[in-house]
Image: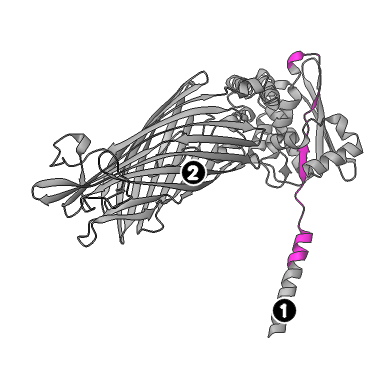
């Protein structure tokens, strides 16, 4: 029996090997910028634009792997990659190895005093043979037709599939304003130099002249940030910035955050009157009530170091206040317990861009916590050595540390992005156990915090649709708190944006699941290098201090930031 199984697996592996040897190898191709032969100064960068127009058509086929422009420039650096390089076998082999491709495509554009003569050829770097060549003479306004013509010709050489949109562009042979391809080429040239401001300007002009210019639209989408500015305030302090985005950042940034959170509504505190400052939320039995408050501020700085790496640091000082009220003799109430956490600490982070589509980030925090607390069930006279504050509250100081891991992923066009951040800390918190046999504060660990966001920008950099999902996972309590938030953000004239979203929440504890709702809204205003973000959130969440209670809470979050303060000088 065992021999049969051996024979079976040997045969299986043999068949798999034969299948892999018999499978057609996917062609790997790189395009150079085309050489321009013209006395017209506006045509100086036309070779860049037409190279990307042809590449745009080739990328539509799943049967061919094309090295994109960003990766090509990154791998080749300052090396010249044009027709002159393609005629030298040594250069062909070197470039082929650097780009991990089998075929190199180059060409030229010759101004015929009206129409353009576009000639392309492809070299097999392993044999140095020209294995394909073609040419076409057309007006510059038919740039979409020219790209589709060479795209189909190349794909047919490899017996690869041709997209229906490529066939449609060939059939239409539409005549557009040649100024659009000129602006596209200038935008790509600016992008190669790292001048994204000028690149956006020229690409937007190309799109304005010809709204159907798909290549300009694709480049604009790549330059657009596919991450909406919705921020959420966690139950414990976690940096609001995903460190993965430090990888590949181009401008330094200094910022200041401020936030506050309190009960959105509640019951009047019988002992302290009708003031909303003393509203409480009661437990199911109606004999205990609580209010939770949170406020904080943080300031930080982020700096790119090279094209792929970035670092950030942050100093924060949040404060959390929890109060317990008890009905001791109906209808009389008294404060049964009160605690305040005052944090002070720092956060260091870094991010690295592994590829044009993927970045990773990590960070670490160190903080000191001062907890002042009172309970009617504590001894009236503190034990020897127990520090107290001016109010007679007991004091406790402790240090804690934590870590953050993060990732950010986007598609080739840059219009769809997904990011995730996970945070852990050995910080300790306390809840009040109302059991008559206990009636004391009990310690528990800070929850594991996981936040992920999926966002899509359907029109470049004007509209963002986002779906954010947040989890607080308590490892030593029977408690889970999760939220799902769909939201939309609209930019106006690149000066300000408005955003609106909804929130659905789930609290699972003690075998019972409780569903909740909420909403969020915000705005951003940009003036020169400065930016002001404001977010307001209404949510239902589990009380930090009173088990079994869900509190309605509003959160107001404000950020003021300034960008490109240092990097504007280093680029000169």
Residue 286 position, x and y percent, is 16, 52
Residue 444 position, x and y percent, is 37, 55
Horizontal relation, residue 360 to residue 522: left or right: right
In terms of depth relative to the viewer, which is nearer, 137 or 414?
414
Asked if the residue under mark 2 is in contact with the one under mark 1, i.e. CB atoms within 8 Å, the reply is no
Give the tally of numbered discs: 2
Whether 554 is drawn above or below 527: the answer is below
Q: Quadrant of the C terminus?
A: top right
Q: Counting residues from the N terminus, which is met first, the one under dot 1 or under dot 2?
A: 1
Residue 26: within the magenta? yes
Q: What residue is shown with label 1?
A: 6
Magenta residues, start to end: 16-42
Residue 328: within the magenta? no
Q: What residue is shown with label 2?
A: 366
Q: Residue at x 47, y 24 (%)?
A: 531
Secondary structure under the numbered disc 1 in the rendered image = helix
Would residue 218 be visible to someone looking at this image? no
Q: CA distance from mark 1 to mark 2?
A: 56 Å
In terms of depth relative to the viewer, which is nearer, 419 or 459?
419
Q: Quadrant of the N terminus?
A: bottom right
Horizontal relation, residue 281 to residue 471: left or right: left
């Amino acid at each position: 029996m065992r021999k049969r199984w051996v024979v079976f697996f040997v045969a299986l592996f043999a068949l798999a090997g034969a299948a892999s040897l018999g499978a057609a190898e996917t062609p790997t191709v790189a395009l150079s910028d085309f050489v321009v032969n013209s006395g017209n100064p506006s045509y100086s960068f036309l070779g860049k634009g037409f190279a990307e127009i042809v590449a745009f058509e080739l990328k539509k086929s799943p049967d061919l792997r094309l090295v994109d422009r960003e990766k090509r420039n990154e791998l080749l650096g300052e090396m010249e990659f044009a027709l002159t390089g393609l005629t030298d076998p040594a250069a062909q082999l070197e470039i082929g190895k650097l780009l991990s491709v089998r075929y190199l495509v180059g060409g030229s554009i010759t101004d015929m005093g009206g129409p353009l003569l576009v000639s392309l050829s492809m070299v097999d770097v392993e044999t140095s043979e020209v294995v394909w060549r073609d040419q076409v003479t057309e007006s510059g306004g038919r740039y979409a037709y020219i790209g589709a013509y060479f795209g189909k010709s190349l794909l047919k050489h490899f017996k690869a599939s041709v997209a229906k949109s490529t066939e449609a562009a060939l059939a239409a042979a539409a005549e557009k304003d040649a100024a659009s391809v000129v602006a596209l080429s200038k935008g790509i040239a600016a992008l190669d130099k790292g001048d994204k401001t000028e690149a956006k300007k020229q690409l937007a002009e190309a799109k304005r002249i010809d709204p159907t210019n798909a290549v300009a639209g694709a480049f604009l989408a790549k330059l657009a940030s596919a991450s909406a500015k919705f921020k959420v305030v966690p139950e414990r302090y976690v940096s609001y910035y995903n460190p993965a985005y430090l990888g590949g950042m181009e401008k330094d940034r200094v910022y200041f955050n401020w936030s506050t959170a309190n009960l959105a509504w509640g019951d009047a505190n019988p002992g302290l009157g009708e003031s909303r400052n003393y509203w409480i939320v009661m437990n199911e039995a109606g004999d205990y009530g609580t209010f939770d408050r949170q406020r904080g501020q943080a300031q930080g700085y982020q700096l790119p170091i090279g094209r792929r790496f970035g670092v950030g640091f942050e100093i924060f000082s949040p404060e959390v206040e929890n109060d317990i009220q008890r009905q001791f003799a109906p209808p009389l109430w008294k404060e049964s317990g009160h605690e305040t956490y005052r944090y002070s600490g720092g956060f260091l982070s870094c991010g690295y861009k592994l590829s044009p589509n993927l970045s990773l980030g990590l960070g670490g925090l160190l903080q000191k916590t001062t907890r002042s607390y009172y309970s009617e069930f504590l001894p009236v006279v503190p034990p020897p050595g127990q520090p107290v504050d001016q109010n007679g509250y007991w004091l406790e100081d402790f240090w804690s540390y934590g870590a953050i891991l993060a990732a950010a992923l986007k598609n080739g066009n840059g219009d769809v992005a997904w990011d995730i951040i996970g945070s852990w800390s050995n910080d300790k918190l306390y809840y009040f156990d109302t059991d008559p046999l206990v009636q004391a504060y009990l310690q528990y660990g800070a929850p594991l915090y996981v936040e992920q966001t999926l966002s899509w920008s359907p029109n470049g950099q004007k509209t963002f649709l986002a779906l954010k999902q947040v989890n607080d996972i308590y490892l030593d309590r029977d408690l889970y708190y999760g939220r799902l938030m769909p939201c939309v953000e609209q930019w106006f004239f690149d000066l300000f944006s408005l955003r609106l979203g909804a929130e659905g929440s789930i609290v699972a504890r003690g075998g019972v699941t409780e569903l909740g709702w909420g909403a969020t809204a915000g705005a951003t205003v940009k003036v020169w290098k400065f930016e002001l973000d404001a977010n307001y959130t209404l949510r239902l969440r589990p009380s930090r201090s009173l088990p079994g209670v869900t509190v309605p809470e509003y959160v107001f979050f404000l950020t003021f930031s300034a960008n490109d303060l240092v990097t504007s000088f280093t680029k000169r």
